[in-house]
Amino acid sequence: MRLVLVGPPGAGKGTQAARLAERLDVPHISTGDLFRANLAEETPLGAEAKRYMDAGDLVPDSVTVEMVRERLTHDDATKGFILDGFPRTLSQAASFGELLAERSEGLDAIVEFQVGEDELVARLMGRGRSDDTEDVIRRRQQVYRDETSPLLEHYADRLVTVDAVGSVEEITDRVLDALRRR
Ligand code: B4P
């Protein structure tokens, strides 16, 4: 199974990706987590990413695409993957399409998590990560609307939309049901 999870910041992509990875037995690959791991290890990539993440902006596509390309060469990704937070722009989607073609692979589905903005802000204020201040949260919602939401049309033929308000367990079941019904 090769899946991409899309949704506004705070929609619960990371929360659900971890659960779905276990149920579907494929690795969970989160670009946000990869950046945060680089940050913690104080790598040059981490230092570069931090500037953007702290402002609520996207890390440049060139950095992000190469990081994903490298991660997909690991053995565990041969059986499939759940990509959480990538692609996030049309340009990343184009590079990702080329990457998949080189690997002779296709995507099974794009899962969109739908949550209203007030609920998103409340969730993120509660999470308390260093990039979860109110101004940065609002900036990230705007970046999602401008740069990421066009992906929904780009992937319209493989889009599965899920109401992502409810308990964590309910939402996992909704995603698995929606994938079965495709
Ligand atoms: P990400 O790490 O992808 O994080 P996110 O979008 O903020 O959160 P997510 O939707 O995964 O929500 P979560 O499960 O944590 O991005 C961070 C930054 O990295 C970006 O701003 C950008 O700078 C950079 N970046 C990442 N990918 C990039 C890319 N491809 N290109 C360029 N830059 C990139 O859940 C949020 C909170 O809600 C948690 O506290 C959780 O416990 C709670 N929650 C989850 N499900 C819930 C539910 N059902 N009910 C109530 N609360 C719930």
Image (cartoon, rainbow, N blue to C red):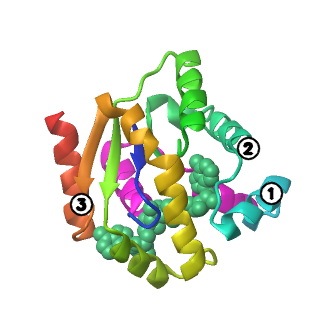
Q: Which residue corresponds to mark 2? A: 63
Q: Answer with the quarter of the image where residue 54 lies.
A: bottom right
Name the residue that disc number 1 marks.
48
Residue visible at 73% across and 39% down in the picture: 62
Image marks 1 and 3: residues in contact by CB distance under 8 Å: no
Mark 3 CB lies closer than 8 A to ligand 1? yes
Q: Amino acid at mark 3?
A: Ile
- The residue type indicated by label 2 comes to Val
Gap between marks 1 and 2, in whole Å?
A: 9 Å
Residue at numbered disc 3: 171
SS at circle 3:
helix
> Magenta segment range?
12-38
Q: Position of residue 169 (x, y in %)?
A: 23, 65
Cα–Cα span, label 1 and label 3: 34 Å
State the residue lying farthest toward the right.
44
> Compared to 22, does 136 lie above or below?
below
Check contact, mark 1 vs mark 2: CB within 8 A. Answer: yes
Asked whether 50 or 172 is in front, the reply is: 50
How crowded pointer 2 is (Cα within 10 Å; few <14, some 14-19, many 20+) is rated as few
| Contact, mark 2 vs mark 3 (Cβ under 8 Å) | no
* Distance from the alpha carbon under mark 2 to that under mark 3: 32 Å
Q: Along the horizontal axis of the image, is 77 left or right of 73?
A: left
Q: Earlier in the sequence, mark 1 or mark 2?
A: 1
**Mark before the other along the chain sequence, 1 or 3:** 1
Say what secondary structure mark 1 lies in.
helix
- Residue 102: tell me if it is visible: yes
